[in-house]
Each structure stands twice: as C-alpha cells, then as structure tokens.
Amino acid sequence: MKRVIAVQMVLMITAVASTVFAQSAPPINENLKGLKPLIGKWATEITLEEDFPGVAQKGDKVSFVAIYKWTRNRNAITLTVNANVEDKVINVTNGLLAWDALNKKIVGLDAYIQGGMYLYEAQVHEDEILLVGHGATGDGAKMEQTVRYSDLSRNGITGQFINRKEGDKQLPDGEPFTLNRVKKKS
C-alpha cells in the first residue's frame, strides 16, 4: 500500500511540475534578445523593381508575408517568407537565425524556393537591425546584400534592401517598405 501511495505521489508531483513548466516559456537566449522586435507575423506589398523572367514582371505588385518565430527552446528564430503576385507564389524562403558561440555573433541562413541561398550576420543596433550577407541566386550568380530593419515599433517596421550586388554588378538600394504586424485572429 505504501508503494502504491508513493507511486501516486510521484506521478502527481510529475504532473504538476510538467504543467508548471509547460506553461512557462523557456528563457530567451540572451544573445538573441535584440531580435525580439522581429518576432511575429508581418505583411507588406511592394512593386517589383525588375523582371523575374517566367515568374513576374517589373511593376507587378508583390504581397509578402514574413513570420519570425522562436524555436521551442528559444535558442534560435525561424523565418518563413511567402511572396505572391495575385494568387501565384513567386518565392518561398525558409531561414534560421542562431547564436554562433564560437565567433560570438548572430548568424543566419535563408534558402529560397528557386534554389538560391543567403548566409548572413545579424547586427543589432539601438535603432536598427542589419542582416549583412552573401549567397547565390537560384541560377548560381553570386549575390551580396544587407537587409536593414529600422523604426522597430510594435506594429510596424521599415525594411530596405541595401548594398546590393549580383555577380560583379552593383545594384541600387531598394525602396524602403513597411512591414505591418498581422494581428492574431480572435
């Protein structure tokens, strides 16, 4: 009988502890706290500045939805971006940002549906976040760019692609755009 009561007590304590720990999120990795303003679902619409042959044309309106989420253990951030022209998907990006303990910096990797990829360092400043990196387009051309997020308010963020280069060709900075927080449906 004592053994049954002891087992029941252990099970009850385990259940209570599991409930308490399940309800409280793990602490955020201290090195990633500066990226907290990005967490959430964001949307914007921009006008294409160049043709994407077979996909979209210069001047088309592109709708973007970006979702930055903490991983379960809050040691990294996942990114998903969907880009559509009307009902046609023209790009899907999946990414991950994490702390590089060896080099003491936040690093990220984005992979694009067209086969391209982008490696970058996230630099957190008082009034902006920069994603500075390089990679390759889907057809294998080298690319460099910086994504600048500024005006980091709770409901809107200004974004801009700057310092852009494809192959040996320097590209003009993109036009600033506003990411608007998508409110959760009740």
Image (tube, helix red, strand yellow):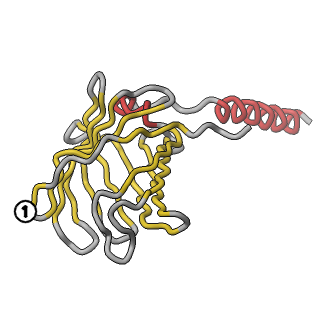
Quadrant in which the N terminus is drawn: top right
Q: Residue furthest left?
A: 168
Viewer-proximal residue among 18 and 156: 156
Residue 112, percent across and down? 36, 64
Vertical position of residue 45 compared to residue 116: above or below: above
User: Which amino acid lies under the numbered mark 1 shown in the image of this protein?
Assistant: Asp
Q: Residue placed at 41% from the left, 33% from the top?
A: 157
Q: Is residue 6 visible?
A: yes
Q: Report x, y in % for residue 31.
A: 34, 31
Mark 1 secondary-structure assignment: loop
Residue drawn at 84 percent across, 36 percent down: 8
Label 1 sits on residue: 168
Q: In terms of image quadrants, where is residue 150?
A: top left
- Mark 1 is surrounded, within 10 Å at the Cα level, by few (under 14), some (14 to 19) or many (20 or more) other residues, namely few
Spot the residue most to the bottom. 54
Q: Is residue 141 above or below residue 129?
A: below
Location of residue 153 in the rendering, given as x and y in whole percent from the top left corner: 44, 26
Give the residue at the far front of this rendering: 59
**Image point (34%, 56%), residue name:** 110
Residue 55 drawn above or below residue 78: below
Residue 178: x and y in percent read 41, 38
Image quadrant holding the C terminus, namely: top right
As drawn, 144 above or below 121 = below
On the image, which quarter does residue 118 sit in? bottom left
Can residue 100 be seen in the rendering of this structure? no
Please report the residue visible at 57 percent of the width from the left and 40 percent of the height from the top: 182
